[in-house]
Image (cartoon, grey):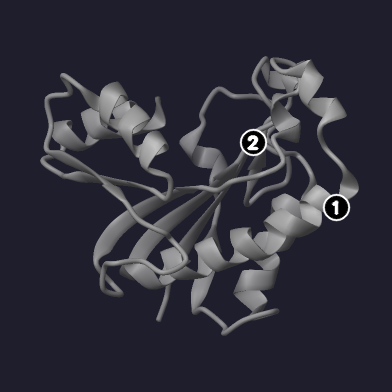
């Protein structure tokens, strides 16, 4: 769904969408979602932690990272019985690696959106802070961008600069978004 929306928006602006999925079956699902989309797009099977593209290739990246899915419990309540505390530990290194590579993949001045359907700090703000501070990997020159102005009319977005949506406040999954601009 996100790829189809982004492809339509990109087509309006004369841009091209590249969607990358690590698993071939998921890439095929994205291709089906994009079928009939008017704009130029490409779907590839690629590992975002070892990307096939050169650094500085993109203007913008939406990094929708694998996560525990705790933010989608209102739609999938049975998932609560499949998750353990150790699951968060397993996702965090992958999330950091994907965000680091995404920041390298945008040009200087380019923006990365880090999105996850989890409200847990270990998968959201802590990942972003760790990457910005160079914890657990090489430092990346980037700055946090205030995402709240991009959602006018949406109440209770918090203190920023990131956004955490909540089912009881926003009628959505507990989704998280941080925007980062590469500075060097």
Mark 1 surroundings within 10 Å by alpha-carbon count, few (fewer than 14), some (14 through 19), many (20 or more): few
Secondary element at tag 1: helix
Secondary element at tag 2: loop
Camera-side residue: 154 or 48? Answer: 48
* Residue visible at 34% across and 38% down in the picture: 27
73 vs 4, left or right, is right
Nearer to us of marks 2 and 1 is 1
Mark 2 surroundings within 10 Å by alpha-carbon count, few (fewer than 14), some (14 through 19), many (20 or more): many
Q: Earlier in the sequence, mark 2 or mark 1?
A: 1
Quadrant in the picture for residue 91: bottom right
- Residue carrying label 1: 86
- Measuring from the top left, give residue 146's x and y in whole percent: 55, 51
One can see residue 170 in this view: yes
* Residue visible at 86% across and 27% down in the picture: 81
* Residue visible at 32% across and 27% down in the picture: 5
Callout 2 touching callout 1 (CB < 8 Å): no
Disc 2 to disc 1, how far (Cα)?
A: 17 Å
Quadrant location, the N terminus: top left
Camera-side residue: 121 or 27? Answer: 27
Quadrant in the picture for residue 177: top right
Quadrant in the picture for residue 19: top left
174 vs 109, left or right, is right
Residue 117, numbered circle: 2
């Amino acid at each position: 769904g996100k790829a189809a929306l982004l492809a339509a928006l990109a087509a309006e602006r004369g841009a091209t969408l590249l969607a990358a999925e690590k698993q071939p079956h998921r890439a095929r699902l994205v291709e089906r979602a994009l079928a009939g989309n008017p704009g130029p797009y490409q779907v590839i099977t690629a590992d975002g932690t070892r990307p096939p593209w050169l650094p500085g290739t993109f203007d913008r990246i939406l990094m929708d990272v694998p996560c525990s899915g705790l933010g989608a419990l209102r739609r999938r309540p049975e998932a609560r019985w499949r998750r353990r505390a150790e699951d968060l530990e397993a996702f965090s290194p992958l999330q950091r690696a994907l965000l680091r590579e995404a920041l390298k993949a945008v040009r200087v001045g380019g923006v990365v959106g880090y999105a996850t359907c989890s409200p847990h700090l270990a998968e959201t703000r802590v990942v972003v802070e760790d990457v910005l501070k160079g914890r657990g990997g090489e430092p990346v020159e980037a700055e946090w961008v205030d995402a709240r102005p991009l959602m006018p009319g949406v109440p209770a977005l918090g203190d920023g600069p990131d956004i955490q949506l909540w089912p009881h406040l926003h009628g959505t999954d507990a989704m998280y978004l941080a925007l980062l601009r590469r500075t060097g």
